[in-house]
Image (cartoon, helix red, strand yellow):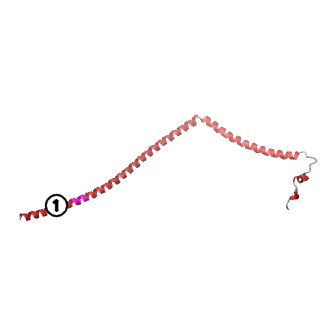
Amino acid sequence: MFCLAATKFAHNFSKEEQEKEEQAKERVEALQKEIEEKKVLTELIKHSLTKKFNEEVQMKLNQKYNKGLQTLKGERNRQVKNFKHNYKDEIDKLKKVKEDRKICKKELEELQGLALGETTLNFQEDEQNETKDPDYDEENDSADYFDDSNSLE
């Protein structure tokens, strides 16, 4: 009887052990799944944080760049204003010289145009005032230079 009771006890004990082992295995599997899910979430969070960090760093760099650029532009504008103020007389003289050049160029073009017009007028007047050679015959002059005997008609 003792054997039978021991066997029943052992059998019941082994069933309980098997159930506990199965429950433990199920719990281990559930924990492993949860760990994998947590790993995936951790990677997503890590990626998201890295991306946000990089964006934040880039934004701050852009702000520093823009601030530096504005400072440089302000400095440049200040230098230009100082230069214009310090050399105002020279700048005005250069502007005056530039305007004078334009005026001189226009006058030169007008004079060249007049000179061309006068030379053609003078040439025409010279032709009209030429003394004519009494032996020169205008009508026969062209006949001396051109021989129409070989022309095709």
Q: Please tell me how many numbered marks the rendered image carries.
A: 1
Quarter of the rendering occupied by the C terminus: bottom right
Residue 86 image offset from top left, x and y in percent: 57, 34
Q: Amino acid at mark 1?
A: Glu
Left or right: residue 106 versus residue 141 is left
Quarter of the rendering occupied by the N terminus: bottom left
Q: Is residue 60 magenta?
A: no
| Depth order, front residue of 70/142 | 142
- Position of 28 relative to 85 (above/below): below
User: Where is residue 92, by image quadrant?
Assistant: top right
> What residue is at 46 percent from the left and 44 percent from the top?
65
Magenta-drawn segment: 24-29
Q: Which residue is mark 1?
A: 17
Residue 97 image offset from top left, x and y in percent: 66, 38
Density class for disc 1 (Cα within 10 Å; few <14, some 14-19, many ≥20) is few
Left or right: residue 66 versus residue 147 is left
> What residue is at 35 percent from the left and 51 percent from the top?
46
- Position of 51 relative to 96 (above/below): below
Residue 135 image offset from top left, x and y in percent: 93, 48
Left or right: residue 32 versus residue 17 is right
